[in-house]
Image (cartoon, rainbow, N blue to C red):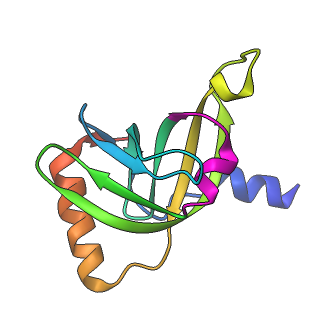
């Protein structure tokens, strides 16, 4: 019960922001070439994005690139926090999924670069 209450009232460590259209994650799954997918939201701690495919494909890569028309951040290491289907489909390979990822260690310069990226792409605080 106590664990449930902590989860219920736990605040996020970082503010999360919705992003402008045209803000993407470039993923390189192990089986296919690179795919560009839309970011849903982002924070200094991680991001969420929508993709089509199997969760196992993204785990093989372990890195993503964040990009817009004007800027990009390459080879950001991540750990998956959540990966859920958005809708039911007959074929698992045809399902759209929402994946939440936590950025792994970021150096001081990486954090500055990420902060500038978020400032450039964010629309409003969630």
**Residue at position x 82%, y 60% in the image:** 3
**Residue at position x 42%, y 47% in the image:** 34
Camera-side residue of 39 and 5: 39
Q: Position of residue 98 (x, y in %)?
A: 57, 36
The answer to if 69 sits in the magenta stretch is no
Seen in the image, is 3 located left or right of residue 47? Answer: right
**Residue at position x 46%, y 46% in the image:** 33
The answer to if 58 sits in the magenta stretch is yes
**Residue at position x 37%, y 67% in the image:** 75
Considering the image in quadrants, where does the N terminus appear?
bottom right
Seen in the image, is 38 located left or right of residue 104? Answer: left
Q: Is residue 32 visible?
A: yes
Camera-side residue of 70 and 40: 70
Q: Is residue 17 visible?
A: no
Q: Is residue 75 above or below residue 110?
A: above
Seen in the image, is 14 located left or right of residue 80? Answer: left
Q: Position of residue 123 (x, y in %)?
A: 23, 38
Considering the image in quadrants, where does the C terminus appear?
top left
Q: Is residue 39 above or below residue 3?
A: above
Magenta span: 51-61
Camera-side residue of 116 and 11: 116
Q: Position of residue 82 (x, y in %)?
A: 65, 48
Residue 114 quadrant: bottom left
């Amino acid at each position: 019960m106590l664990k449930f209450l902590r989860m219920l009232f736990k605040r996020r460590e970082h503010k999360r922001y919705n992003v402008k259209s045209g803000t993407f994650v470039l993923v390189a799954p192990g089986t296919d070439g690179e795919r560009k997918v839309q970011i849903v939201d982002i924070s200094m701690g991680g991001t969420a994005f929508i993709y089509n495919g199997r969760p196992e494909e993204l785990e093989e890569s372990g890195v993503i690139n964040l990009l817009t028309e004007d800027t990009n951040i390459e080879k950001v290491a991540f750990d998956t926090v959540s990966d859920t289907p958005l809708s039911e489909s007959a074929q698992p390979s045809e399902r759209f999924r929402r994946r939440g990822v936590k950025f792994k260690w970021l150096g001081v310069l990486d954090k500055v670069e990420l902060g500038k990226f978020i400032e450039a792409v964010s629309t409003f605080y969630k």
